[in-house]
Image (cartoon, rainbow, N blue to C red):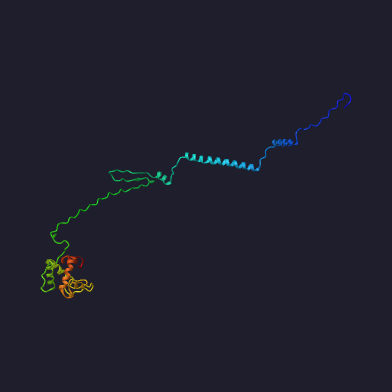
Amino acid sequence: MTSGNEMIPARRMPRQDLVSPDEKTAITSSRSAKSAPPKWSRRRGVLGVFAAFAAIGFVAAYVGPTGVALSEASAEERVPVTLYSSTLGDAQSLIVESSADAAVAAVDLDRAGYTVYVTPKPTPTPTPTPEPVVAEADETSSEDSSSGWRPPFATPDPGTAQAIAYEMVLARGWGDDQFGCLVALWNRESGWRVNAYNASSGAYGIPQSLPGNKMASHGADWETNPATQIAWGLDYIGGRYGTPCGAWDHSESVGWY
């Protein structure tokens, strides 16, 4: 307190805060959080780069095939041209003239100055068909067509082997012509000898039985009796060839009966 009119400045009292210490701490931290700029970590940066590359790859994978397909669809298909086809087109030309009623004409090929001549095909000559040959009628057609020359008949001498055979031939109903064939056949085989023997084949007797003991069916004396041998021989000829002339024809063709 002063005297008189002198004014003494009043002393400013410090301001008392009405906020508690905990609230001050919260307010200070919130202000610092708002004012501080955001900080990016290294991991977030790497992930961002990978995400960018993945997006670019997806776009390329989608757009690339579509562009190639469109380009292939719009491209024109080209026919490959070979050296051979181009050479033929440049150096060779073929002109063929044909007619239905005329032969094939010569064909001229332009081969860089060379001329080719094609020989026409010859017309085939028709082969004449031979006419069938008709056999003329033979005056002797009434005789046996398979028979050739037949030996003539001759009367045998009495008491001989041929005389015995002649009686047996007639008893069988055969004629003189059959006897003539029989005489010629056994003349060739044995000469009408009872003991005729073929050393190479083993045939024996007048009819040349092979082997000779086959004639034992007509008698035990087959080695010496001409009647026994002739009876067996006529039975063999009748059963195999029918007649003596049939046996003669076979012997004429093959050399044996």
Using the image as rendered, state which of residue 68 and residue 49 is in the foreground.
Answer: 49
Pick the quarter of the image with the C terminus.
bottom left
Residue reaching furthest to the top: 5
Total number of numbered discs in the rendering: 0
* Residue 62 shows up from this direction: yes
Tell whether 186 sits left or right of 42.
left
Pick the quarter of the image with the N terminus.
top right
Q: Quadrant of residue 146?
A: bottom left
Residue reaching furthest to the right: 3
Q: Position of residue 166 (x, y in %)?
A: 12, 70
Q: Position of residue 31 (x, y in %)?
A: 71, 35
Taking 181 as reference, is 42 above or below it? above
Tell whether 140 sits left or right of 115.
left
Tell whether 120 sits left or right of 14.
left
Q: Residue at x 55, y 41 (%)?
A: 58
Tell whether 80 sits left or right of 218.
right
Using the image as rendered, state which of residue 37 and residue 110 is in the foreground.
Answer: 37
Q: Quadrant of residue 189?
A: bottom left
Q: Residue at x 58, y 42 (%)?
A: 54
Using the image as rendered, state which of residue 101 and residue 13 is in the foreground.
Answer: 13
* Residue 247 shows up from this direction: no
Taking 103 as reference, is 187 above or below it? below
Q: Position of residue 88 (x, y in %)?
A: 40, 45
Taking 208 as reference, is 130 above or below it? above
Taking 120 as reference, is 223 above or below it? below
Q: Quadrant of residue 190?
A: bottom left
Q: Position of residue 125 (x, y in %)?
A: 25, 50
Q: Residue at x 16, y 71 (%)?
A: 231
